Amino acid sequence: MSAKKTAAAKRKSVRRASQLNPEILIFDVDGVLIDVRETFWLSALQTVHEITGKRATWAELYRWKSKPENNDDWRMVSNWVSSMGHQVSYEQARDAFQKYYWGENGKPGNVLKEKLLVSQKQFSKWASRCELNLFTGRTRREFSYTFERMPAASLFRNVVTMDDVKNKKPSPEGLFKILANRDPDSALYLGDNIDDALAAKAAGVPFMAIIPRESFDFRNRASQFRELGALAILNKVIDLNSWLTKR
């Protein structure tokens, strides 16, 4: 996209953001509500190393996560190692990944390192203002392990996992399921992946991207999200508060 078109898209997003007053908040989970660098992403690096014999870098992982249809880590690993000459199916990538994430033979998995990025108090504040929902690429089992034991779980009206839809992100099916024929402009979706932005665009749901400023290739990733219509680039999900207070 040319600089002129990029500037025009940014002005359009700013105008739309100024008019937005969401009644429905929809959150992605990984990288938004949970720090997954030492869980899902580390498991992906370990799986790539196991299959290829080569140590994958964090920079490589971020590049692959920035490609469409790689929100699903199993799909990403399959695509990644196949590009290196190791033809691995989705199912094979999934099975190799699982032992690092969940653990095996009595060895604990990376799942034990799950870190929640939002407090119960913050969830409660959002719930007092808006209807809360989750649209995640996690399986129901992965979601349940972390969220269903939390008091905040009761605050979410709808939870859509990959097991609840026929088509995974970037399909907007999960967003349509949550909206249930309600006006897309009454909602706001917050995600950190290109597939989140593509799903939001397809559903006509306003979108904000979560990208920590210190993260890899911040400027290019932010530009990519803006081209897809992101209304704002937030450093962390709780930065939503300062934006909502202006409403």
Image (cartoon, rainbow, N blue to C red):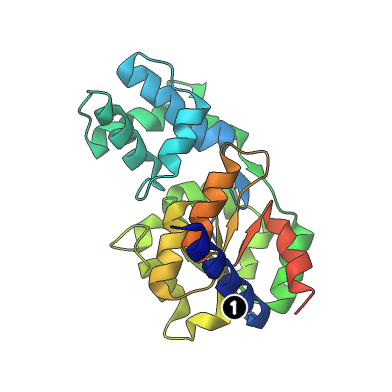
Name the quadrant containing residue 7. Answer: bottom right
| The C terminus: image quadrant | bottom right
Which secondary structure, mark 1?
Answer: helix
Give the labeled residue for mark 1. Answer: 16
Q: Depth check: give the residue in front, 167 or 1.
A: 1
Please state if 178 lies on the left or on the right of 52 as rendered.
right
* Mark 1: amino acid: Arg
Percent of width and height locating residue 23: 62, 81
Percent of width and height locating residue 67: 39, 45
Q: Depth check: give the residue in front, 193 or 9.
A: 9
Please state if 35 lies on the left or on the right of 161 as rendered.
right
Q: Depth check: give the residue in front, 162 or 104.
A: 162
Q: Is residue 95 above or below residue 210?
A: above
Instruction: Identify the residue at horizontal 50%, vertical 66% (top origin).
Output: 229
| The N terminus: image quadrant | bottom left
Percent of width and height locating residue 184: 48, 80
Percent of width and height locating residue 119: 75, 54
Residue 4: tell me if it is visible: yes
